[in-house]
Image: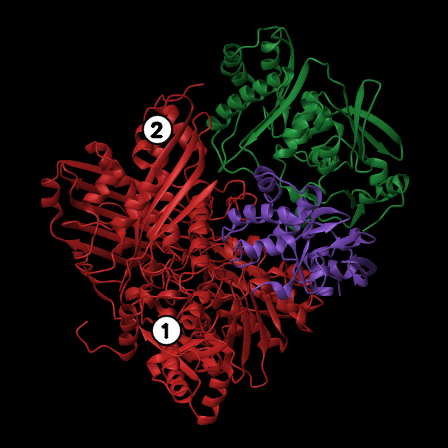
Chain colours: A red, B green, C purple
Amino acid sequence: MASPRAEYVKVVEELFERKKEFWLIGQYVQRWDAIAKMLGKARFTADEAYFFKNLAYVYSVRAKYAHAKIRKIDVSEAEKVPGVLKVITYKDVPGVNDVGYVLPDQPLLAYEKVRYIGDTIALVVSEDPYIAEEAAEKVYVDYEPLPVITNPLDVVSFGGLKEKEHTLIHDERGSDVIARFRILKGDVRKGFKEADVIVEGEYRTQFQEHAYLETEAALAIPELDGGVTVIASTQCPHEARRAISRVLDLPFAKVRIVVPPIGGGFGGKEDVVNEIGAKAALAALLTGRPALVIHKREESIIGHSKRHPMIARYKHGAKRDGTLTAVEAEIILDTGAYASLGPFVLWRATVHSTGPYKIPHVHTESVAVYTNNVYAGAFRGFGNPQVTFAVEQQMDKLAEELGMDPAELRLKNILRNGDRTVHGQLLDHGVGLEEAIRKAIESTDWYRKRAEYAKQTGTVRKGIGLALLWHGNSIGAEGADYSSVTLIINRDGSISFRTGLTDFGQGATQGLIMIAAEILGVSPDYFRVEQPDTSATPDAGPTVASRSTAMGGNATLVAAYKLRQRLNQVAADMLKCSPDDVEIHAPEVYCRSDPSRKIRWVDLIEECFWRGVSLQEFGYYRAPKAVWEDETGHGEPYFTYTFGTIVAEVTVDMETGKVTVDRITTVYDIGKVINRVGAELHAEGGAIQGMGYALMEELVHDENGRVLNPNLYAYYIPTIMDAPKEVVALWVEAGYRRGPFGAKGLGEPSIVGIAPAIANAVAHAIGARITSLPITPEKVYLTLKRLGKIGL
Amino acid sequence: MYIPKDLDDALEYLDKNAPDSIPIAGGTDVLIQIREGKLKPKVLVDLSGLKSQLSYVKRFNGKIAIGALTSVAELDESFLVKDRRYLGFADVSAKFASPILKALATIGGNIGVAVSASDYVTLLHVLNAQVKLVSVKGERVIPLEKLIVDKRTLAKEPNEIIYEVLFNELPENSSTAFMKFDRREMIIIGYVTCATYLQLENNVIEDARLAFDRVAGRVPGRARKTEDFLKGKEFSLEVIRQAYNEVLPEEMKRKSDFRASAEYRLDMSKVMMKRALLKAKSRIEGGV
Amino acid sequence: MAQTQSQEYPEVAVTLNVNGKDFTVNVKPYERLIDVLRYKLGFLSVKEGCGRGECGTCAIIVDGKLVPSCLVLAVQARGKKIITLEGIAPQGKLHAIQKALLDTYAMQCGFCFPGVIMAAYYLLSRNQNPTEDEIRYALSGNLCRCGSYLRFVKAVKLAAEYIRKGQIYFDLKTVPS
């Protein structure tokens, strides 16, 4: 923090201070790719396969057991099947047989053991996908089954989170604990002594499946130089390149990743392409043909990461007036067979584990462990939805104990400008949480409904509940946090926009274009977005962690700003006014003080070309280094936080336990609304996905580690008939001075607070609390039945 | 794929080639069974071209006959969903799979699949439906309840196909209703389903029939003891409550699975039974 | 050497009528219509999301009816009129439902859109004044994970309005990109 500010930081801060009027930022603008997609012309990864001859299909032969030693793999029969081009096993991997994102714990092709039912033993490559699948039945594996662990409590126990005696899943690591974090502040024993009320609870959340409509796909083309190009549905092209290079033992320059439009990501396509891209690349290089890996839905469900289930025990203490005195928590995350992004998920969960409140005494201990379930990794929210589900119900429970309104209790304890987080981080500006609460309460007529619904009788009851959230922007202490963008003004006046940030529906790129457009003075349709391509677009870091606008936006800002300075100089010379006086409203460029002095945008560009003034700019932004002390959780984990208040209104049919969500009101403090279309769609889409998490989604394993509902027929995501009547999206703009025009991220915050708000609304409706997700009709009904609140 | 010219052709082919060859109508179940590797037929006999012969909803001689190839979408357009007595068909359709499957899925297929989620079967049970089967040897009529022996198991020869389903027209003072619910509104298996037929005169239950997705076995069935309890009694919530609390549990044995517990399923059977009866009653009295 | 099951079945020639044109193509009897439309005929708007008729992304119109192309075998579609997204409006024009989806800013990843548009197209071809419940029901077989559902409802209502006013097609050039 004390180091001299980099130039790019100065640019961002200066623009935040200076620019108060916007002609484009915050407007409704159509996505750059809307028309192509609307006409059905956008080509997703699997669509690209149509354009290749001699395509080879790669079929993955998967494990028969969720936990077993491999004694022998025999592919000789499969190889003999007519039409089979090659059968690939671990022996054929030229480089390192590993695709783990954080820890090197995940073999691409199994060789000594399998640890979950999705593990791949062999790849059958054939021109005919039906033959590949048939031949797979002739791959014979000699297994020695091992005990299957599906319950994380068989690996660690509460009361210290010590690892228990069990058959190790990752014996090569010597332990099935992948990470531990903690927050230790003050003295919780003292804090609880000072408390007038204490509230405890155990909270459980489930495996959630991304269920993007486009399943995973990767198409690899062998190149003339012995390298490979992989067209893949990935959120992180540069990470995929790293992983695939490692597997193939090729330098980065020989591995090219190209990213077409993606049909949904939500975190599910962060690390899976390490695996399927490597599979496709291997097949392509070994057969000399373009090779396609495409997951059927059932394969997608068992073959990529899930949201970590959580079991957490919380204890909250507060004074009679509602002031929090202490919070204690033990949090266990089930990371399944492989770590994936588990260590980072655990870290984020821990950072956020106490909610956006001031608390004098805190002790959180967290741990993530292996089981033989499908592995868990990144999923929108990344550990925060889980802990927020626990925290926000704890807060409501406290409110009940204290006889206080839940909103009032929050207002008593929330972080405000000038406060320090439980990590000791000073938030001297940009905390829009109070405003968010007040807007939410006002918009939903909160107090009247709280009072009215509490008096209900009858078997159909309404409820209204709220939840707060905070979400650190970008990757925090997970790694080096940087982003980059290249802007190139072409000689015809059009602008090429290049970044390694990908789009899987969230439309953040539109926001980046709007930032550049705002600064340059041209409309968004002058821009052409080049598809992310490790050979052509700069490494912008992964498209994760709600960082596209916050980080990519700054990189864009910096590039656009520098270009604009140069354009101003040349225009000033051409128009004979000062650079500050130059107004660009393409296709016109004129002097603000004398608009009659004008030229055309294309003339300005042409003049720059002839003068040798560079029309290209590379924008780079590096976030301040996060600070985190492992022993205490003290530091500055994220450079800024998005805040939010969610109010959910539900109707509960007590006879069946079915919960219907009538309305969700979201108020997010995102610093500054850049792309209003994208922001609203996030509020709506996140509400619906969060509603699924809250009420109906659950991936279930049996005791053998097999998934019982690996299809969309038995894994329930919301249909249009389940969507609430309304999602009201309101905004608070408590700008963060080092965000692009003060903007903060929304990708993940938009799901974090939904499930707890619904849980709290249900509790309000029925007078009883469900502490595990999903809140199925059965859970509600049986709770009511046991309490005697409903009888047949 | 064998595409028969007409029904006789199809029956001939099946007679010679079943069980390696199986008939396919809409394919909404057969193709999924093949995808999952549960069915590996050598040949599919495509019946979809026989629609002109096998797709109809007719009434004659006090009976209603529905051709086996009548799609759910076609049922939605028939007189059945406009007739107060047969609104149970509208109820089934409203929660049937998804709108995208309705043009393909057929009532014959629903019967042929014979699982607890075969909603038309559940409804047809309360209509005392019969099924006409045909083969090269001729035709025979068998009660639906006897045709479906167990999950995905029919008492029919591989060379027989389902031709039509028949039931008697219902009296004026009666109606049907069907209930299905789950965690979400559409594309659902259903925690439980309940079909009912109710005949009321001066608020007295002249006749009542109840069918559920499962009663004692793994396929839809009737709850006859509960029906008998209701018959002749005054229609009231108290009577219904007695029926489902005292009698239904005697004949209904629910199982737990990962989706729901036996207890919940039994309780929801009671709730759905009540709601179905109330709905049927309101239809008889002029509501919808 | 034993033949694979796949090799036991010779291809057959079928003629498919897609968006008004006839295409003759060789297919295996077990080949799905979705694969033939996509990979043999290039109608890439037809998407696969589940292969079991549960997600709606492969929805097309066959002989005036909405069907999931992943559950129809290509040989079953011979002689039938098939309409895919590519065929709902003339070249250079947008259908009212497409225009309405742009006007309501419904687009996110776009993968579910072809199926949603076909389902909406089917609804509007039978009902030019649908209620919100009718719209929700008609689209209930189309899953959208990005969550544009509320926009779909608005868009179908708007499209119905356009159609009632006689505006069925919109020139692409008049639409701001």
Mark 1: amino acid = Leu
Q: CA distance from mark 2 to mark 1?
A: 49 Å
Of all chains, the one bearing label 2 is A
Asked if residue C153 shows in the view, the reply is: yes
Q: Secondary structure at mark 1?
A: helix
Question: Looking at numbered disc 2 in the image, what kind of residue is underneath it?
Answer: Tyr
Residue ranking furthest to the bottom:
A611
- Few, some or many C-alpha atoms within 10 Å of disc 2 (few <14, some 14-19, many ≥20)? some
Question: Residue at the location (74% across, 60% down)?
Answer: C6
Query: Residue A609, image x and y in percent?
Result: 48, 90
Q: Position of residue A414 (x, y in %)?
A: 21, 48
Q: Which residue is denoted by mark 2 in the rendering?
A: A453
Seen at 63% across and 27% down, the residue is: B220
Tag 1 residue: A557
Classify residue A788 as left or right of residue A301. Answer: left
Q: Which corner quadrant of the image does residue B161 belong to?
A: top right
Is residue C53 in view? no
Going by the image, does A744 lie left or right of C115? Answer: left
Please tell me which residue lies in front, B284 or A327: B284
* Image position, residue C109 (x, y; %): 53, 59
